Amino acid sequence: MSSKWLDATFKYGALAVIAAVIVLFSLLNEHFLTYDNLTDILRSISIVTFVAIGVTLSQIVDGFDLSVGSTVSLTTVVAAALMVWYEQPLVVVLAVPLAIGILIGLLNAFLIIKVKIPDLLATLAVMYVIGGIHRTYTKGYSVYNNMQMTDGTKAPGVFTESFLWIGKGKWLGLPVPVLLMVAAVALVHVLLKYTRWGRQLYVTGGNREAARLSGIRVDRVRLLAYVASGAFAAVGGILFAARTGTGQIDAGASLLMEAVAAVFVGYSVLGAGKPNVIGTFFGAVLIGVLLNGLTMLNMPYYAFDIIKGGVLILALAATFVHLNRRRA
């Protein structure tokens, strides 16, 4: 009975916690369970979800990408600068940050696969390098409409309505970033579950040598995982700039921990026991609901990290207790 109870807790615990938290906040604040607030929660987690999808892909190949938060910060300020400083068209504003994310993924893959630096150390180093680059590029200032430049002039450009629509607009009555998030989760889920590439990712992460002996080009699979991680983080950076209408230099500061928490909460969703994008999405929902509810209850923002850290501890404990039981 105890074993069955533990298995059921692992399988449905995360979903039960999400439901319980929603009920609790609904009882404490009558405005929580409204359409506007629920769409605000989904809009807010869209950025975290994109970043967490990238972390999920690196986790699947038995890696870890710590550079995603800095990638968000860099691509956010680059997207903003392209509009505000250089008045570039929308296609350039979208393409350049995405290319930067891909390049960061390639750099991570090179250091990990070719130079043989452990993934945590390699992506940690890249995280610091990117952080220094984007602060040097902006001279430590956030980017905003008609901002004062260091030479005393004003920046010539502003955030265009077409760009802001990506982060704030609606299509068919639904927020655009929410639609993009749902489409990304569905697409990646299909790719992971029903395609050869998805199976190769999981086989590579499960046993790299066995994957190599079975004919899988392991290094290429790992390369694609890190490139995808950088690309998804870049999309998160674009969405951040489009949602806030600024290029904040610390845009990705809190996103790494939130993304990691979402990924590890996702391990236990429906008993997956491994990185998976559906679980990651529900993990992001849990983080978003908690932060939104605590904000509505006027909890001070500096206490939020305690909550996020606690969620991460519980997710890790549930995951590794269950995995250790399965191995025993």
Image (cartoon, rainbow, N blue to C red):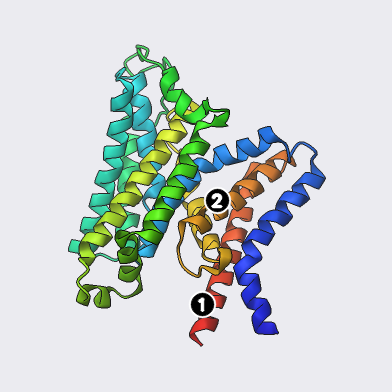
Q: Position of residue 35 (x, y in %)?
A: 68, 35
Q: Residues within 10 Å of mark 2 (few under 14, many from 20)?
A: many
Residue 78 appears in the picture as rendered: yes
Identify which residue is drawn at 52% across, 55% down: 262
Q: Residues within 10 Å of mark 1 (few under 14, many from 20)?
A: few
Between residues 200 and 141, which one lies in front from this camera angle? Answer: 200
Name the spot of residue 175 as percent of width and height, x first. Answer: 54, 32
The residue under label 2 is 284
Mark 2 is on which residue type? Ala
CA gap between label 2 and label 1 equals: 22 Å
- Identify the residue at image location x=55%, y=51%: 284
The picture quadrant where one finds residue 265 is bottom right
Q: Could you say which disc has been placed on residue 323 in the image?
A: 1
Residue occupying the point 59% across, 54% down = 308
The count of marks equals 2
Q: Nearer the viewer, residue 44 or 72?
A: 44
Q: The residue tagged with tag 1: helix, strand or loop?
A: helix
Residue 237 image point, x, y percent: 41, 38
Dot 2 or dot 1: first in sequence order is 2
The residue positioned 70% from the left and 84% from the top of the image is 1
Q: Secondary structure at mark 2?
A: helix
Q: Amino acid at mark 1?
A: Leu
Whether residue 248 is visible to the viewer of this picture, yes or no, is: no
Q: In the image, is 120 to the left or to the right of 306?
A: left
Is 143 drawn above or below residue 10 in the view shown? above
Q: Is residue 40 left or right of residue 185?
A: right
Q: Determine the residue located farthest toward the front in the rendered image.
A: 194
Residue 214: percent from left, percent from top: 22, 75
